Image (cartoon, helix red, strand yellow):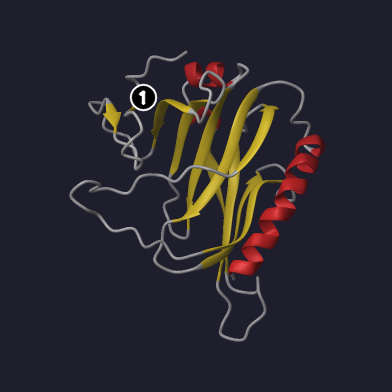
């Protein structure tokens, strides 16, 4: 499985550029990164985030994802969303996407023949504040879009980052979504203990 993931990742570097041109993503709009991550304790494969109007067009695709081994602790009592994936820019972030994944095939079975889950339709654009979309349309900023996979309900979260103002690394400006519904929560502690706390919407001071 690990070998298949590495091969697929190499292919995505090529496919992302092709998909961006085919989908007309280079005509202005927001900078965004798409990703989907397994939140279950079992392995899954063929995880995809797709265009809702044309499922043959993918924003993100990964051949396989390992079981999620996260467990709550005193320092991190709740699961935090995982960000990362394919960076497409600039384009109009879609109103909706489709999420799919496959169960692993039986022992000895061919890859990608396990049970297909989905497509599940997820609203996206209307769930991102307009202020965040405006910031993501500026050079040097992007919004990372994170979708859960492997179980229902699918959770959607977003994070606005700045990758230009710092000489090394990125700056997290704001985070929000299904995992941050308590509006009294002003900031969260990243998993990297050396990083600054991230402001939670609507308590963000945007660039």
Say which residue appears at 59% left-offset and 21% top-offset: 140
Residue most extreme to the front:
167
Position of 27 compared to 93: left or right? right
Of residue 120 and residue 46, the one placed in the foreground of this image is 46
Question: Split into 4 quadrants, where in the image is the N terminus?
Answer: bottom right
Of residue 202 and residue 153, the one placed in the foreground of this image is 202
Residue most extreme to the bottom:
108
The spot of residue 129 in percent (x, y) is 46, 22
Q: In the figure, residue 142 lies in which quadrant?
A: top right
The spot of residue 205 in percent (x, y) is 38, 14
Position of 51 compared to 78: left or right? right
For mark 1, give the secondary structure. loop
Of residue 94 and residue 175, the one placed in the foreground of this image is 175
The spot of residue 149 in percent (x, y) is 49, 55
Say which residue appears at 56% left-offset and 85% top-offset: 107
Task: Report the label total.
Answer: 1
Q: Is the residue 96 above or below the residue 65 in the image?
A: above
Task: Answer whether residue 117 is visible to the viewer in this image.
Answer: no
Classify 10 Å Cα crowding around label 1: few (below 14), some (14-19), many (20 and above). Answer: many
For disc 1, the marked residue is 201
Q: Is the residue 187 above or below the residue 55 in the image?
A: above
Q: Is the residue 62 above or below the residue 183 in the image?
A: below
Task: Answer whether residue 45 is visible to the viewer in this image.
Answer: yes
The spot of residue 185 in percent (x, y) is 25, 29
């Amino acid at each position: 499985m690990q070998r298949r993931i590495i091969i697929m990742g190499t292919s995505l570097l090529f496919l992302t550029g092709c998909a961006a041109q085919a989908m007309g993503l280079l005509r202005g709009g927001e900078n965004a990164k798409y990703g989907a991550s397994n939140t279950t304790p079992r392995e899954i494969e063929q995880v995809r985030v797709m265009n809702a109007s044309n499922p043959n067009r993918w924003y993100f695709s990964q051949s396989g994802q390992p079981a999620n081994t996260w467990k709550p602790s005193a320092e991190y009592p709740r699961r935090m969303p995982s960000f990362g994936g394919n960076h497409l820019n600039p384009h109009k972030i879609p109103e909706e996407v489709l999420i799919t994944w496959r169960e692993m095939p039986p022992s000895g079975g061919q890859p990608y023949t396990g049970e297909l889950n989905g497509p599940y339709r997820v609203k996206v654009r209307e769930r991102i504040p307009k202020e965040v979309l405006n910031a993501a349309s500026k050079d040097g900023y992007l919004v990372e879009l994170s979708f859960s996979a492997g179980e229902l309900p699918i959770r959607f979260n977003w994070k606005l980052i700045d990758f230009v103002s710092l000489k090394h690394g990125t700056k997290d400006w704001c985070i929000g979504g299904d995992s941050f519904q308590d509006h009294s929560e002003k900031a969260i502690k990243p998993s990297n203990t050396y990083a600054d706390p991230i402001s939670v919407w609507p308590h963000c001071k945007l660039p």
